[in-house]
Image: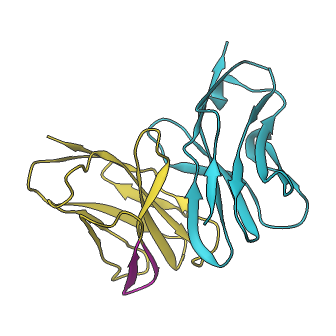
Chain colours: A yellow, B cyan
Amino acid sequence: DGGITQSPKYLFRKEGQNVTLSCEQNLNHDAMYWYRQDPGQGLRLIYYSQIVNDFQKGDIAEGYSVSREKKESFPLTVTSAQKNPTAFYLCASSILLQETQYFGPGTRLLVL
Amino acid sequence: AQSVTQLDSQVPVFEEAPVELRCNYSSSVSVYLFWYVQYPNQGLQLLLKYLSGSTLVKGINGFEAEFNKSQTSFHLRKPSVHISDTAEYFCAVTGGGTYKYIFGTGTRLKVLA
């Protein structure tokens, strides 16, 4: 059964701590994306990757980092430099960069 | 630059009544348009998309949308809603050679018994 999985569902971060959100897909999609969702603001693009070992900054990349070592995986690290990390984070993938995007179930990040 | 406007932040409607969720976009190039639905604490699910061809697009769960180029709109409609349609709905636009999806701020549909 193909799809996108994100873990964990909820994540708690302490001040000054880096945390990593997992995103895995078995759809054989080349392109993957990370979005941040805040109430009333829609979705904003953090990073995207169109191929293994390559990724680009989106609109709000400051305080975040990513890697793309495998086609199936695109983890997002929220660093201590991100001062307002509380949000719902969504991972998406598409066959190619300009194709229809499909979304994972999301991870809610909360600050302790 | 492309942009998307969803004028209604909330739309209450009684069960079995029709509903229209409005989406207007601005773009100087050909566009692709999408509607996604999001249930509480879940990801976005694709309802329907317009890429080219017929301007009336049918999607899942009985929803449909009409692409109107002259009015730069892509309104979502359903003739008879169910309680289970209560969710947030997002319109998105891309196109013109760009990979970027531009999302609207969402419309929260609340179906009342």
Q: Is residue B74 left or right of residue A15?
A: right
Q: Is residue A112 left or right of residue B51?
A: left
Q: Is residue B42 left or right of residue A74?
A: right
The residue range painted magenta reads A48-57
Residue A1 falls in image quadrant: bottom right
Q: Which quarter of the image is occupied by the C terminus of chain B?
A: top right
Residue at the right extreme of this rendering: B54
Residue at the left extreme of this rendering: A16
- Name the residue at 25% across, 50% down: A85
Position above or below: B15 against A43 = above
Magenta stretch holds residue A46: no
Q: Which quarter of the image is occupied by the N terminus of chain B?
A: bottom right
**Residue A5, position in %: x, y?**
43, 58
Magenta stretch holds residue A52: yes
**Residue B65, position in %: x, y?**
81, 47
Position above or below: B7 against A58 = above
Position above or below: A31 against B12 = below
**Residue A56, position in %: x, y?**
40, 78
Residue A20 falls in image quadrant: bottom left
- Name the residue at 65% across, 37% down: B7
- Name the residue at 74% across, 40% down: B61
Residue B21 falls in image quadrant: top right
Position above or below: B60 against B31 = above
